[in-house]
Amino acid sequence: MVISLLEDLGYATAELILSGERSPDDLPRLQRIVTATADALERVLGAPAGCLQQASREGLSQWLVSPSLKAESL
């Protein structure tokens, strides 16, 4: 179950990161995905709520920079 949750997180994240178009909703969507996955993992593992460390908004936003903007900054 843990592997399945992490695999789903990876697929959802890759879909957002690799999409050619960016939307203002991408960052909140990615945050919801990460939060939901952490919550599910805590429940499956029987861990206390909030015990898993999650990426910050700033950390997640770095993954959502458009590839064209990354190339321009180089």
Image (cartoon, helix red, strand yellow):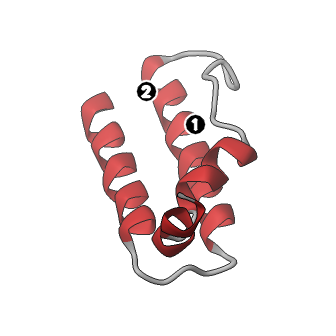
Above or below, 8 against 29 in this view is: above
Where residue 59 sits, quadrant-wise, is top right
Q: Position of residue 67 (x, y in %)?
A: 46, 69
Camera-side residue: 69 or 44? 69
Report the side of 49 relative to 30 (left or right).
right
Q: Quadrant of the N terminus?
A: top left
Question: Which residue does the image show at 41% across and 80% down from the upper left?
Answer: 20
Q: Mark 1 = which residue?
A: 39
**In x, y percent, where is residue 8?**
32, 50
Residue 12 is tagged as: none
Distance from disc 1 to disc 2, alpha carbons, whole Å, reads: 9 Å
The mark that comes first in sequence, 1 or 2, is: 1
In x, y percent, where is residue 34?
Answer: 56, 46
Q: Against 23, is 30 above or below?
A: above
In the image, what residue occupies the spot 50% across and 42% down?
A: 37
The image quarter in which residue 18 lies: bottom left
Side (left or right) of 18 relative to 41: left
Quarter of the image holding residue 65? bottom right
Residue underneath mark 2: 44
Q: Amino acid at mark 2?
A: Val
Q: Residue at x 44, y 19 (%)?
A: 45
The amino acid marked with disc number 1 is Asp
Residue 62 place in picture, x, y as percent: 61, 51
Q: Count numbered badges in the picture.
A: 2
As helix, strand or loop, the secondary structure at mark 2 comes to: helix
Q: Nearer the viewer, mark 1 or mark 2?
A: 1
